[in-house]
Each structure stands twice: as C-alpha cells, then as structure tokens.
Amino acid sequence: MWIVILYLTVASSIEVSTTLDLFRELIVKKILTKCHKKGHKMNRDSPSKPRSAIPAYLTGETEDPYPSLSDIHDYEPNLEFDDTELQQPVDDEGEIIGIGIESDEFLETPVSDGTIEENFEEAFGLPSLIPEYPSLIPEQRDSLKELDVDDFIDVAQHRIVDVVGDDTYGRKVIVVSACRLPSNKVLDHNRLLSYLMHTLDNYVETDYTVVYFHHGLNSQNKPSFRWLLQAYRAFDRKYKKNLKALYLVHPTNFIRVIWQLFKPFISIKFGRKMMYVNYLSELGNHIHLNQVNIPPPVLTHDAQLMSKIANKSGQGSQVDSSSSVQPLPTQQFGVTLQFIKERNNGQVIPPVVSRCVEFLSQPDALETEGLFRRSASVSLVRDVQSRINRGESIDFQRDFPGDYHLAAVTLKTFLRELKEPLMTFDLFDDIINFQRLNKEERAQMVKTLILERLPEDNYILLKYLAQFLAKVQDRSDLNKMTSFNLAVVFGPNLVWSQNQQMSLSAIGPINALTEHILSHYLEIFIL
C-alpha cells in the first residue's frame, strides 16, 4: 500500500532505537507464531522461543543496537506462506474440515495482490484508531463519492495532491508534494485523508502511478505516527491493485533504512513498485516532466544536488541549447498534426491513429474489459513508437494479435505527445470554466468551441475519435468503459495548458467537457 511509503518518509519523528524496538517485537511475535504452528522444539531455558530459531539481535540479547539489515533478510522467508500451512484435513467427500464462513478471507489470500494486510495496532499494542477518526468508518466512505473538490477547498487550496495526465506508459499520474503540507496547527489531517481517498477514488479503477516529492517535509508539517497507521488501514486493496509504480523523489538515507525494516511486512510484489529517484532528470525517463507542476522548492533542491555533482566531477553544467534534435521525416510522435499531414500526402487522419482505431474496432477489442484503462508492456510501447517514427509499417493484427491494450496505449500516447493538444491552447481558458455554466450554456459553449474555433484538421480528427469512442461506449456493459470512464482517460490527453502544467482543479472541467462531447457527439459534429 503506497501510504506505507508516506510513513517511511516521516518516520524520522521516532527515534531510531524506538523504531528498531517496535519492529524487533513484531518480528519476534511473528516468528513465535510460525514456530508454534510448525511444532518446533522449545528451548529449556526459555520456553517462549524455539531452540536456535530466533536470532539474538531480535530478542535484545545482543549488545549491538543496530544489527545488520542483511540478517533480517535471512529470516524474511520465514514470514511468508509455506505449503504446510495450506494443508487442511478433508472429510470423505473431499470437503475441507473446519472451514466455515470465516474462511473466505483466508482462502482469498493466495489470489490477492500479495500485500500483507497486517494489523499493526494489535501488533504494537495500540488501541483502535477508528473512533479517533470517525470519517474513516466504512459506512461513511460512500458519502465521499457524493462530494466534489469544492467540498474540500480547505485542503485542496494547498495543492498537496495533483493529477497531471499520463506517464510515458499511458498510466494516470498522481503527484503528492510534501513541501506543500502546511503546519499541523493549520491542516486537519483527518480532512486530508478524506480528500486523498476522494481524489484517488476517481482514478484507482485504472492503472495509475504515484510520484511523491519528499523534499520539504519537516517537524512542523509531518503527520503523526498514529495517523499514518490509520491511513494505512484506510487504504485497502482497492487502492493497491492498480498502482503500477511509486516514485519516491529525493529520498533521504533515513528513509532507505526504514524501508529495509519494513521489508519483512511488505510483499515482494509491492516492493517492486517502489522506486527511488535521486534527481528529476531520472524521473523524466518515466514521467512527462513538462506536465508536472513541480513545486519551486523541489526544483531548487534538485538544482543544488545537480550542482554538487557537477562540482565533484569537475564539469560544468552548461548545456548547448542551440543544438535541437530535428524530427525524422516519418516521425508521428512528438510533432504537430500539420507536420504529419504534409508528409503523408495531405492525409488528415495520422496513420498511427487509423491503424489503432481499425484494430480496436474489432468486436473482441470493443468487448475487452478495461480498454484504455489498462497499461501495456513498456518495452512494446517503446518499440512500437520507435518503429512508427522510423516509418515502418505497423500491423497490430499481424505483429501483436490480441494485444488490444498495446494499441489503446499507443493511441493515447500519440495524443498526449502532440506538440499542441487536439483541443488547442487557445481553448484552454474557456474549457476550465465549463462546469460553472448551466446545462444550456454548456451545450452552446461546446458547439462554439468545436464548430467555430477549432481548426479544421483538429475538428476532423476529433470527430473521427468521437465516432470510434461511441462504439467503445456502446459496449460498456462488457468493457466497463462508460462515457465518464472514457472522459477520465482521454480528457487530459485532449486538453492541457500551454505551460503543460495542470492542477487538480482543472481536471474536473476538462473531464466534464470530454464526457459532454462523447455523450452528445451526434448533436455536435453536424458538419
């Protein structure tokens, strides 16, 4: 669960020795439980532990207060599942004995996402925190769906959380900036957690990525340990299963140590999702940095780090800005529609778009659950982009039969990497005011923007896409892609500002406009 990483970043509020004591106690408890189940022989001197089963550093019998982390790794397999625990007695009819209603949770474990649902309050001997944070009671979570960002204006105004379009793999990007957390005396962390859940609820049904800027967290704005434990419990499997990557930017050495201590309690599968990013240049390999509204303190901190590297290496940080890479004559990604049109005999619909739409218009593709929501193989997406830019002919049916998600991600990537969005920069200011209009005004505004102000080539391509997406929407009973879900996916790929940095407050109007277009395309595209 990604909220655990947030805990790792603020764990400096606890003394290192205290943290080690807590985890030592929890590890001992888990090993004792394992040994009891497996029937290990007990040590005569200390019947509470099996002979030679618990290392001294875990029981506090060693003088070394900071044991080697590699020793913890040696015992990590003992905390995982083993075959003996899954063997159950059966009756004459082959039914498992002793499995009743309560067994559902146990039987579901092997097919879950692999994240251990640990009861930390019980393990640490802490009381339940639900009464302390009443808005997190499950019965009240449904009420969050009825709220919008304006209901959290006291939290949203700090811009702690932003949704900034898609990453280089076609996944939604959610950015959390620690430096924007106000003082604990100002911010109600209970409201913050509700706001986080409300924001994520709009995107966790699709593959998504989280970027966490750690710089700026301090003793004045860090959440409490108890709150973090409660937050960990609040973010259940719904929020974990589609999280594909968590980038922790500018990590400190303390975070790395605490992460090692957490490893025994975090699944290997989730551990692979978390990646340290030391510099923004590294983050640029995975995220479109020009889409992200990076806080100025983070930019300054990164520049200082890069300056230190340059000084150590004895090299300057001068960059020859005059040398710009010219696009290939056959390139389709990262150029303008006009550039593609001029090099394809005046064809308005780019070849990559027509190839993707033709492949995805097949019945099997239209009925694929989560079409345009799921990500594709990173290596395949890059390979397809490179081949198309080199002018090679791509036949998805021949080269990638049945890989509909690859074609879907390729189409979204093409739209996102246009030099100018399909709904041009000139329309952005009008679009972000869309939700302030009443129903009649919205309909008139959309027609004005599309029929009168949108360039002809953009109009033709937008109409082509809307007609195709109408087919996808018609099969929403099977693919689950309603007009709302399609708008969430395509909105940020059709509209963005000229500086390409988008705030969470702009996402709502953009998605609302996109949904209106998809729901009323027959009334809008009359030419």
Image: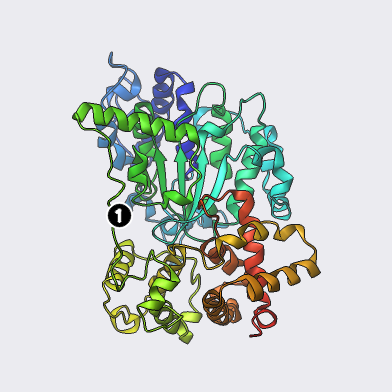
Q: Give coordinates of residue 467: x percent, y percent.
A: 57, 82
User: What residue is shown with label 1?
Assistant: 324
Q: Is residue 95 left or right of residue 328?
A: right
Q: Quadrant of residue 280?
A: top left
The type of colouring in the image is: rainbow
Q: Residue at x 65, y 79 (%)?
A: 521
- Residue 124 lies, in percent from the top left, at 50, 28
| Farthest top residue in view | 63
Q: What type is the residue that disc 1 sits on?
A: Ser
The answer to whether any part of residue 405 appears in the image is no
- Which sits in the foreground, 18 or 325? 325
Give the structural element (helix, strand or loop) at label 1. Answer: loop
Q: Outermost residue toward the front?
A: 322
One can see residue 267 in this view: yes
Q: Position of residue 102 (x, y in %)?
A: 56, 53
Residue at horizontal 66 percent and vertical 39 percent from the top: 157
